[in-house]
């Protein structure tokens, strides 16, 4: 049975409640809890006697227990729309009671000020309008009054945390425009905004907009001035935004906003403008954003449910105590760098792969993006650095231990990395071996010369070689292309020979994003499919999938990890019993119960036959994604991902999140780390995050090694420009997967021979173990089993080709499901 466990971690929830949320869904059955009425907060009115705009009346909501506690609270300011009063927002006090009581949001002080100026159409600006010819209707400094005088009054009157990270502002319609302006232009005061159906227009308001009528954007006797509007517009504020003071925007709008009948003004419909705002803001360094489109128009049928979701989103980001310093190392150039992987090595050292877009620490780049592998000793001191670079782009997607203390790095190149691809203009997959001394041992570059090919994942095969996974947009093996892109999985020997490469896909865009070697000699591969994979009917726009291949490269099964929504498998962890844990994300419900909001982290275990053992789905109301995992003791897995929300304690815009999942699928407490900026994923939300096991060694506790991109900086460091790369350790009882160890204890040779003008393939497997074994020998020309091969003895078979020519091929010797694959050369008999 697929037992789903779906804890929705929220700030303020106690450990007992969190544990209850887990156990209540084990086995797919929900535990009914008695309903209790939410404790009510206190609502009272107040006045700022003197401000830049004169007196300010307001209503304030004080959370339950405010009078009985000494704690200080975060503050949320709510701005009403044009023509409304402070009373409009009072209808959400019951929602606040309910959400606080349920632990959905933290207790907070909520201030609802009145804005009577300019006929209740001030647009919350510092107006320069002096009124009409008689002076009637003159504007005033509402923006200064609210962002300075009102905030100072509230902090002096109530127990609030006097810090930008503990303040947010929200509003609807004209108030949404004000909330947006306050958040972007007053970063030193507010860190987040709830922006509902905002009356904002780019580049100028339409001719019939009331933004032109009341003087909020006026100058002198003109109630509207185009230059003044541009000066106060959000594009101007975004251009001046300081990324060192990051802000978050929750934008929501109804899908039935008034549609302007003039086609020339259609782009100023508020639903269109809201989408424009979101798409512009989320691309600005220092800004993260969420967008929701609800069923409804420009009214409280949209604003009330949007507020409920928005306040949950924003509450998770408000901080009343300083964040713990982020303990990590920072590496990078002044360019837009990316992480390329990390590996713990047998001697206690590490290897880190960097993708550098500029000069770094004495390294001068060869091209626009270079891969550089850095080897360190157990104390962290650099031993050597080795570039894997051409004059074109080269990017690593993983580094793993290789043979004899060396490392293997895999990814893609647009250049001539192996010296045999001069003039290439398309991406090729590559695997490069670097010796323990930092010298290049060999380079494998492969792909369809007329198409793009990339390796997106690499895993050690336990014999000094590696498994790789990625995609081709052409054809690289015997199989023709099935569609736009096809997934690839292959094996490379310790000597750099491509032992096999398999292409699989459907009619859409299919990619392999993860690969893991199983201790029984098989290999798992997973990824995403845009049109369904062979043997797995398409379920949604994008489907996740996992497949199992034998050591000889033959597919054993393929399973979809999919709903009718978007799903993706990003990471795989093979466990000691041969089962595999897939890590990814879903917008649907892969376990029991519904989706928790946007993408959720999904973790699914499958046995060696492809049957689902359990599924765990974890998320917030925002975007949460599982990226990879690290095996731990007792087959537990540390899940590593990214979140916009608060699975643990939120730190910044996008955080790196880790949480353990026990062998039976039960999730543990989440930990979030990072800077105040975006960490672990780029501005398109593509993850750039790697993890590797670092077992206990030399008195050092076990850990998971993490590396990824950051637009910020760990404590005590400074970002060199754009995205840099962090390297960190997080405590974890890490175990190195027994991926077939060193394979079966066999010494295997294969060669093509001629006898009486006929070709044969001879295979010999000598047992180097300490007990008799049954050995299966296989070639394209047959299979033969030799039983009870004693230690030191050999299993031998000569396979008749029944032709005079033998093409190059592979022979396999298998013991207990674990295989050794060796190539043999082509031969033509005289």
Image: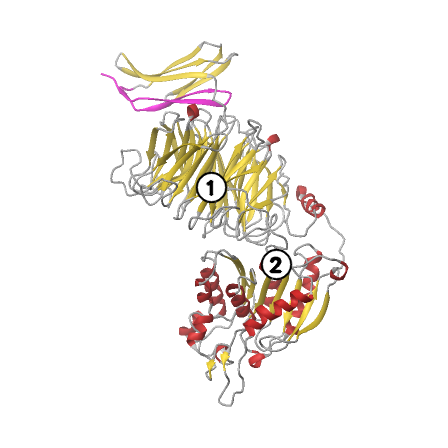
Give the position of the N terminus as an image quadrant. top right
The answer to which image quadrant residue 668 occupies is: top right
**88 is higher (above) or lower (below) than 2:** below
What residue is at 58 percent from the left and 69 percent from the top? 148
Between 162 and 733, the residue placed more toward the observer is 162
Going by the picture, which residue comes out furthest to the left? 830
Given this view, does label 1 or label 2 mark the residue nearer the observer? 2
Q: Which secondary structure, mark 2?
A: helix
Task: Write down the residue under mark 2.
Answer: 166
User: Residue 687, can we see it?
Assistant: no
Is label 1 in contact with label 2 (beta carbons under 8 Å)? no
Q: Which mark is residue 527?
A: 1
Residue 596 locus on image (x, y percent): 60, 52
Q: Is residue 532 left or right of residue 611?
A: left
Callout 2: 10 Å neighbours few (<14), some, many (20+)?
many
Give the position of the C terminus as an image quadrant. top left
User: Residue 416, can we see it?
Assistant: yes
């Amino acid at each position: 049975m697929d037992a789903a466990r779906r804890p929705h971690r929220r700030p303020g929830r106690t450990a007992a409640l969190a544990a209850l949320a887990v156990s209540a869904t084990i086995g797919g059955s929900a535990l009914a809890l008695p309903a209790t009425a939410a404790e009510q907060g206190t609502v009272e009115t107040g006045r700022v006697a003197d401000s830049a705009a004169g007196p300010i009346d307001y209503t304030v909501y004080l959370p339950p227990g405010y009078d009985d506690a000494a704690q200080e609270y975060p503050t949320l300011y709510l701005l009403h729309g044009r023509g409304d009063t402070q009373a409009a927002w009072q209808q959400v006090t019951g929602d606040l009671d309910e959400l606080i009581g349920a632990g959905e949001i933290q207790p907070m002080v909520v201030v609802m000020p009145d804005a009577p100026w300019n006929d209740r159409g001030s647009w919350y600006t510092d107006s320069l309008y002096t009124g009409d010819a008689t002076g009637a209707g003159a504007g005033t400094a509402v923006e200064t009054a609210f962002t300075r005088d009102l905030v100072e009054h509230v902090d002096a009157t109530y127990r609030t945390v006097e810090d930008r990270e503990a303040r947010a502002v929200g509003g609807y319609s004209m108030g949404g425009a004000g909330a947006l302006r306050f958040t972007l232009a007053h970063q030193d005061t507010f860190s987040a905004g709830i922006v509902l159906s905002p009356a904002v227009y780019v580049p100028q308001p339409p001719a019939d907009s009331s933004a032109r009528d009341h003087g909020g954007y006026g100058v002198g006797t003109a109630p509207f001035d185009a230059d003044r509007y541009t000066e106060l517009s959000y594009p101007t504020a975004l251009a001046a935004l300081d990324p060192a003071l990051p802000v978050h925007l929750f934008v929501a709008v109804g899908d039935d906003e008034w549609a302007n009948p003039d086609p020339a003004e259609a782009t100023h419909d508020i639903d269109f403008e809201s989408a424009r705002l979101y798409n512009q803001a989320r691309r600005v360094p220092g800004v993260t954003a969420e967008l929701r489109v609800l069923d409804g128009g420009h009214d409280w049928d949209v604003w009330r449910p949007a507020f409920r979701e928005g306040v949950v989103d924003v509450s998770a980001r408000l901080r009343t105590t300083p964040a713990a310093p982020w303990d990590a190392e920072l590496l990078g150039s002044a360019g837009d760098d990316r992480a390329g992987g990390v590996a713990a090595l047998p001697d206690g050292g590490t290897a880190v792969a960097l993708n550098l877009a500029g000069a770094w620490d004495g390294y001068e780049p060869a091209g626009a993006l270079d891969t550089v592998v850095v080897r360190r000793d157990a104390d962290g001191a650099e031993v050597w650095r080795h570039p894997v670079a051409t004059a074109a782009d080269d990017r690593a997607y993983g580094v793993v231990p290789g043979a004899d203390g060396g490392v293997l790095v895999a990814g893609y190149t647009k250049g001539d990395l192996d010296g045999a691809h001069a003039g290439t203009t398309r991406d090729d997959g590559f695997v490069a071996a670097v010796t323990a001394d930092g010298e290049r041992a060999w380079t494998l570059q492969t792909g369809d010369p007329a198409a793009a090919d990339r390796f997106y994942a690499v895993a050690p095969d336990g014999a000094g070689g590696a498994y790789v996974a990625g995609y081709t947009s052409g054809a690289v093996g015997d199989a023709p292309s099935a569609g736009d892109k096809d997934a690839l999985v292959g094996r490379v020997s310790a000597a750099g020979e491509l032992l096999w490469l398999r292409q699989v896909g459907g009619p859409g865009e299919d990619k392999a994003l993860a690969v893991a070697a199983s201790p029984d000699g098989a290999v798992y591969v997973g990824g995403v499919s845009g049109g369904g994979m062979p043997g797995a009917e398409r379920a949604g726009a994008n489907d996740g999938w996992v497949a199992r291949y034998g050591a000889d490269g033959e597919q054993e099964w393929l399973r979809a990890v999919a709903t009718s929504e978007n799903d993706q498998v990003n990471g795989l962890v093979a466990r000691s019993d041969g089962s595999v844990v897939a890590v990814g994300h879903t917008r649907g419900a892969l376990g029991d119960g519904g989706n928790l909001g946007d993408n959720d982290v999904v973790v699914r275990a499958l046995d060696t036959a492809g049957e689902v053992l359990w599924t765990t789905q974890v998320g917030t109301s925002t975007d949460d994604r599982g990226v990879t995992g690290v095996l731990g003791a007792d087959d537990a897995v540390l899940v590593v991902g990214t979140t916009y929300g608060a699975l643990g304690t939120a730190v910044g815009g996008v955080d790196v999140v880790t949480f353990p999942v026990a062998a039976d699928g039960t999730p543990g407490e989440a930990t979030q780390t990072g800077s105040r900026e975006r960490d672990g994923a780029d501005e398109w939300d593509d993850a750039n995050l790697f993890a590797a096991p670092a077992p206990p060694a030399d008195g050092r506790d076990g850990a998971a090694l993490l590396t990824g991109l950051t637009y910020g900086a760990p404590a005590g460091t400074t970002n060199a420009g754009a995205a840099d790369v962090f390297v960190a350790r997080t405590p974890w009882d890490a175990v190195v997967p027994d991926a077939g160890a060193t394979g079966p204890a066999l010494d295997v040779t294969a060669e093509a021979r001629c006898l009486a003008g006929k070709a044969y393939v001879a295979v010999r497997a000598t047992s180097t173990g300490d007990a008799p074994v049954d050995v299966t020998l296989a070639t394209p020309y047959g299979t033969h089993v030799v039983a009870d091969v004693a230690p030191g003895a050999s299993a031998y078979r000569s396979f008749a080709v029944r032709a005079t020519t033998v093409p190059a091929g592979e022979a396999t010797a298998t013991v207990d499901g674990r295989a050794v694959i060796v190539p043999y050369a082509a031969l033509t008999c005289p």
